[in-house]
Amino acid sequence: MEYRELGNTGLMVSRLCFGGLVIGPLQKNLTVEEGGEVIAEAFRLGVNFIDTADLYGTYPHIKRAMDISGIRPIIASKSYAYDKEGAKKTVDRALTELGLDSIDCFLMHEQESEHTIRGHREALDYYLELKQQGVIKAVGISTHHIAAVRAALNIPEIDIIHPITNINGLGICDGTMDEMIGAICDIYNQGKGIYGMKPFGGGNLLHSFKECLEYVASIPYLHSIAVGMQSIEEVRMNVELFNNLDEAGDKVKDYHPENAKALHVDFWCEKCGTCVERCKQGALSLETGELIVDYDKCVLCGYCSGCCPAFALKMY
């Protein structure tokens, strides 16, 4: 497994990052024991970096993986908190549920531009206070927007960027993949850490697995790449590929993924529009009293299912 320093943070992370979203209640909904075993296998095979979020509900799975493996990985989490009180609650929850007294990276979740970052400034300042105290080692943002990556260029306190990076630019809300590459190149040259998300478009691009993997592996500005893994078999396959990325294309030429998923709307959907407002991709709309999914825009994050008051949206 190749390891790289995450920008100037001093954190040495594996090129393969475990994407923690897919094992939790927003997607596969593995039990703590099942999810812990999957993550523990990744740790045992050299993956020392895992990405999660307050929203994902996967802290217990990660703690179980640490207990099983005896390995303390580098952990990055994220929060939507915009003020000090909310930021404190989410950091405290992370530390409590992980059973830790410090966390490596804490990010502001789904930032869109300089304006949203400014709107979350109170939370950012709290994370920076904790960084001074040694409770957090690095702070940053996750984003689907090129504008937010550009905004981070002018905020020296931001250490890490977690942007969408895939061959089609699927999920980027304000431009093309080429434009995103230009922005993260500038971020990279500033010494900030960068780890990509959704290299397979949340699962939409799995039919082009080989091309997707070769593409993200070729981006020199990514210190790590977060890949969602739902089973021990997926972990072993991805670790093998990332252990020799130069030959990964040959190894996966006959790979036909079986875990393709889609967003399903159950018949009891109340058409309240909550999910439409929540979807940053513009993939959901209400038309003639029906909830419509634009599958070309949906990145299969499952965030809409988490906000549905009727539990009518499911990812499988």
Image: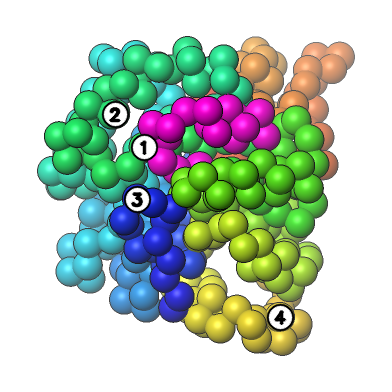
| Residue farthest toward the front in the current orientation of the protein | 189
* Residue type indicated by callout 4: Gly
Task: Give 208 or 166, whichever is nearer the viewer.
Answer: 166
Pair 3/4: label in front: 3
According to the picture, the residue beneath numbered tag 3 turns out to be 9
Q: Residue at point 60% right, 23% down?
A: 113
Pair 3/1: label in front: 3
Query: Circles 2 and 3: CB distance less than 8 Å?
Result: no
Could you say where residue 269 lies in the image, as x and y percent from the top left? Answer: 65, 23
In the displayed structure, 48 sits above or below 161; it is below
Q: Residue at point 58% right, 27% down?
A: 151
In the rendered structure, find residue 139 and report the number of the disc placed on it: 1
Q: Residue at point 38% right, 51% down?
A: 8
Mark 1 element type: strand
In the rendered structure, find residue 129 and report the number of the disc placed on it: none
- Quarter assignment of residue 44: bottom left
- The quadrant of the picture occupied by the N terminus is bottom left
Query: Circles 1 and 2: CB distance less than 8 Å?
Result: yes
Q: How far apart are marks 2 and 3 (CA)?
A: 15 Å
Q: How far apart are marks 4 and 1 (CA)?
A: 34 Å
* Residue type indicated by callout 2: Tyr
* Residue type indicated by callout 3: Thr
According to the picture, the residue beneath numbered tag 2 turns out to be 127
Q: Distance between the residues labelled 3 and 1?
A: 9 Å
Mark 2 element type: helix
Q: Distance between the residues labelled 3 and 4?
A: 31 Å
Q: Is residue 252 left or right of residue 33?
A: right
Q: In this view, does 187 lie to the left or right of 295?
A: left
Q: Which circle's residue, 3 or 1, is located before the other in the chain?
A: 3
Could you say where residue 46 lies in the image, as x and y percent from the top left? Answer: 36, 75
Query: Circles 3 and 4: CB distance less than 8 Å?
Result: no
Q: Magenta part of the protein: which range?
A: 145-162
